[in-house]
Each structure stands twice: as structure tokens, then as C-alpha cells.
Image (cartoon, rainbow, N blue to C red):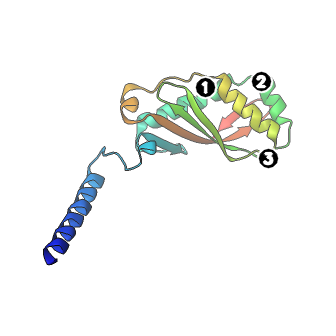
Amino acid sequence: MRRAIGRQLDEEAARREAAETAARTPGALPLSLSTARRVRLWGRTDPNVELVEYAEAISRRIQFNTPPETLKSLASQPHRPPMVTVSIRSDGSVESVTFFVSSGEAAVDTAIRRIIEELRPYPAFPPTLARSYDVVEIRRTWHIAPTTLQLY
């Protein structure tokens, strides 16, 4: 009986040690496969410069390609600045658009979704980014003025 208990303790110690080693190994996949190749960029800073540059390119595309008529229409409606997370797959397709903070106005939220959808497809990930991630989640706060759209 003592031998069985000893073997069980040895097996548990080996599992713990393997888990600790895997956690320390760079590039090791986390236990959850659903988030294994997903990265979140909330803000404008990250050690991965290529990730930041990609997110900035997406933000610029949205800012500079939103029609002026749409901006005037949205700015005229009372709303607060929404915080929006756009999930983009490595091929440039949009996986989801999620409002972390709503604008408080359904028409504004719908228009933001439409703006994001109309600009599809977005550029595919650069090769080095695509090797590391399948989905990039970019969260920005949208400040809408009659003549400009700022994504912070």
C-alpha cells in the first residue's frame, strides 16, 4: 500500500514539474486551445512592435476611410465615446465586433458595426505575426466629431 502511495506521489510530482517546465518554455501553447493563438491589444503599447504597427494600420484604415457624411450624422447624435474590440483573423477577415462600452445610442453602435464591416477585408497579418497568432483583438475608444474620427 505504501508503494502505491509513493508511486502516486511520484506521478503527481512529475506532472507538476512538467507543467512548470511547459509554462517556462517560450512559445509553449496554453492549456486552452480556443485561446492558444489569440492576442489582445488594448491600448497602443506592447513589446511586439509588429503587432502594434498592424493595429495602427487597421485604426488608420478605419479613420481615413469613414465617409464624412457618416461622421456628421454620428456626431449629431447624443452619445458617449464607445469602446470597441474588433477581432481580426490572420487572413484579414473580421471574426467579431464587441462593444466593451456602448455609445448609449443603438443607431451609433449599429453605424460603427457597419463601418467596420464595410471596410472588410482588412490586410492579412505579416508573415511573422501570422506564425504566432490566428486572431488579433484590437480595442479602441472611438471619439466621433463632425469632421474627424479618432481611435484611442
**What is the C-alpha distance between the residues marked 1 and 3?**
25 Å
Which of the 4 image quarters holds residue 146? top right
Left or right of 1? Residue 48 is right
At a point 81% along the width and 42% down the height, the residue shown is 105
11, 108: nearer the viewer: 11
At a point 77% along the width and 46% down the height, the residue shown is 80
Q: Secondary structure at mark 1?
A: helix
Pointer 3 residue: 104
Q: Earlier in the sequence, mark 1 or mark 3?
A: 1
Left or right of 116? Residue 56 is left
**What is the C-alpha distance between the residues marked 2 and 1?**
14 Å
Which of the 4 image quarters holds residue 140? top right
Which of the 4 image quarters holds residue 88? top right
Q: Earlier in the sequence, mark 3 or mark 2?
A: 2
Which amino acid type is marked by label 3?
Gly
Could you classify mark 1 by the number of other residues whose Cα lies within 10 Å: few (under 14), some (14-19), or many (20 or more)? some
Which amino acid type is marked by label 2?
Pro
**What is the C-alpha distance between the residues marked 3 and 2?**
22 Å
Left or right of 89? Residue 133 is left
Is residue 23 shown above or below 61? below
